[in-house]
Amino acid sequence: MATTAALVPTVPVHATTTPATSLHFGACPESMPVPAAPDRVECGWLSVPLDRERPDGERISIAVSRVRASGPPEERRGILLVNPGGPGGPGLAYAVTKRAKLPERVRRSYDVIGFDPRGTGQSAPADCGPMGGLFDSPGAEPVPSGHTEEKAYLDSLRRMADDCAAGVGDALEHLSTTQTARDMDAIRSALGERRIGFLGVSYGSYLGAAYAALFPQRVGRMALDSVVGPGKWHDFDLRQSRALLRQREVFFAWAARYEERFGLGGSAGRVRDACRRARQGLAARPVNGFGPAEFDRAVYRALGRTERWEDLAAGIHAYLHDGDIRLLRPAAPFDGTASRTYEAANRVVKCADGRGPTPGRVTAGLRRLRGLDPQPIVTGIEASTCAYWHHIPARGTRLGSPAAPPVLLIASEHDPVTPVEGARRLRQRLPGSRLVTLHDDYSHGVFASRGNACVDSAAAAYLVDGTVPATDVHCVGPGLPTPRVPDE
C-alpha cells in the first residue's frame, strides 16, 4: 500500500436545485428482510416527482433507512448512502447488512443510509407481468443455435418488452439511473447534508458515477466497488459473458484438481464434459421444473463468488450420479414477488439508460459468443430486451466528472461479473481517483466483503480520514479456495 497520501479537498457547494422535502423516520416495515435488525434502524418515505420535468405531477415514495453513527459527535463524517447493485436490487435492508461488515471506524463515523431505488423494493416497484415467459419453469433453451431458435429468442424479447410497456406504463421512461441519482440528491437535501458519502457495489458503482456527473460539487467521499464502467449496457453484458467463459475454464481446472473430492474427472476437459452432460440431461428431462435455463442460472450465480464453487461441483456430481438437483438449486436471494420486481427493474433501468441494440446486433453478439464456446453463458445479457423497448431515451447516462473530488475505485483482479477494465475506464472520467486492486482473487464484491485487511484499511482511511493513496493500491488476494473436508 502507498505510504504517502493526499486528502480529499474541500469543494464549495452551490445552492441545491432539489427542493427540500421532509423525511421523518420511524419504525421499519415488518417485511424488511433483515435478520434480527437492531432497534436503532429506522425507516421513512420521501416523496419525489415521478417526472422531474413535471414537478407538480405524479409523485412516488422512496423508501429510506438509517442506522446512525455509533461514535461521538466529534467523529461524525456525515451520511454514507449505500447501494448493493443490480440494477433492480432493493437497498432498504442494506443499511443494516452492509454496515455490519464495515470497519468499525466507518460505523462510528457515518450514518449509514439505505434506500430502495425507484422501481425496486418498496419504492414504486416495477411490474412487467409475465416478461415474455421469463418465469416459465422449466424455462426455454436460453442459447439459440440456429435461425429458427434465434427467431424464437427475438420473439421472446419482443414479448418481454411489450409486457414491460403494459405493466410499467407511464413510468417506463422515468425509472433510469439518472432519475435515481436525482432521488439520492433529494435524500441528501431532506437530511440537511451538504454532501453525500457513498458506497456503491456493482451497479451501485454506475449509480455513484452518475451522481458524480450530475452533482460533482456535492460528492463527499465516494467508494465504488466492483465497477461497471462507462458504455452501453448491452456491450457491458457481452463483456461480462466473455469473462464468465474465462472464469468457467478456471472453475473446470479447479474442480479437476480436486478429483477425489468431486469425482468429475482429473482434467479440465473431463470436468467440462461432465458439466455438458449434466446440462444435456436436464434439457432432455427437466427435474421438478429445473432445466437448462435454470442450470445456466445456477452456473452464472456460482461463478461470481468462489465460495459457491464447491456446491456447484458437488451439485453437478450429485445430479449425474443420483439425479439430485438440490445443490444446484440454492435458495433464491428474494422471494417470488421481490424476484419478479428485480427482474423487471433490471430491464427497465437498463433500457431507460440509453439506446438499446438492434435485433441484428443481438443475434450477432450471440453468434460471436457461440464462436468462443458452443455453450456460452447468456444469463446476464438482459439489455437484449432493449432492442424492442417502447421508449427510446434521448441520451445515454453520463458518468463521472472532472469537477468531482477523487474517488476510490475497488476491484477484484479476476471478477467475472464486473471485469476490472471497467474500473480502469471509469477512472479516466474521474481525475485524481485511485484504484485498489485485489490480486489473485476471483470474486465479485471486495470492500467489507472479502475480509482483506489491505483493501479494507485503504477504504476506511479514505472514507474516514479523506486519505487518497498517492498511487494505486495493490493488495494480495486469497487465491482459489480449498474445498472443505466432508464429514465422515
Image (tube, grey):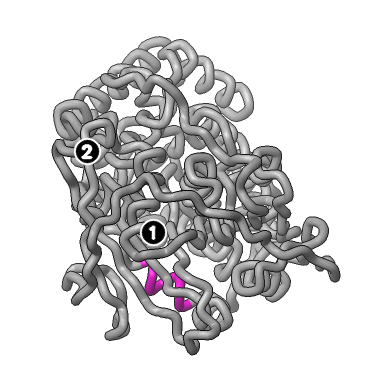
For the point 24% across and 41% down, the residue is 137
Q: Which residue is mark 1?
A: 188
Between residues 407 and 21, which one lies in front from this camera angle? 21
Q: Which residue is mark 2?
A: 55
Q: Is residue 165 visible?
A: yes
For the point 34% across and 35% down, the residue is 347
Q: Main secondary structure of the magenta part?
A: helix
Measured Cα–Cα span from mark 2 to mark 1: 18 Å
Q: Magenta includes 97?
A: yes
Label 2 or label 1, whichever comes before in sequence order: 2
Residue type beneath disc 2? Pro
In the rendering, at what x and y percent does residue 58 appear?
Answer: 14, 39
In the visual, does 437 lie left or right of 159? right
In the rendering, at what x and y percent does residue 469 appear?
Answer: 77, 63
Residue type beneath disc 1? Arg
Q: Against 477, is 159 above or below? A: above
For the point 21% across and 23% down, the residue is 162
For the point 55% across and 83% down, the residue is 75
Counting every numbered tag in the picture gives: 2
Between residues 312 and 335, which one lies in front from this camera angle? 335
Specify the segment rendered in magenta: 94-100
- Residue 8 figure quarter: bottom right
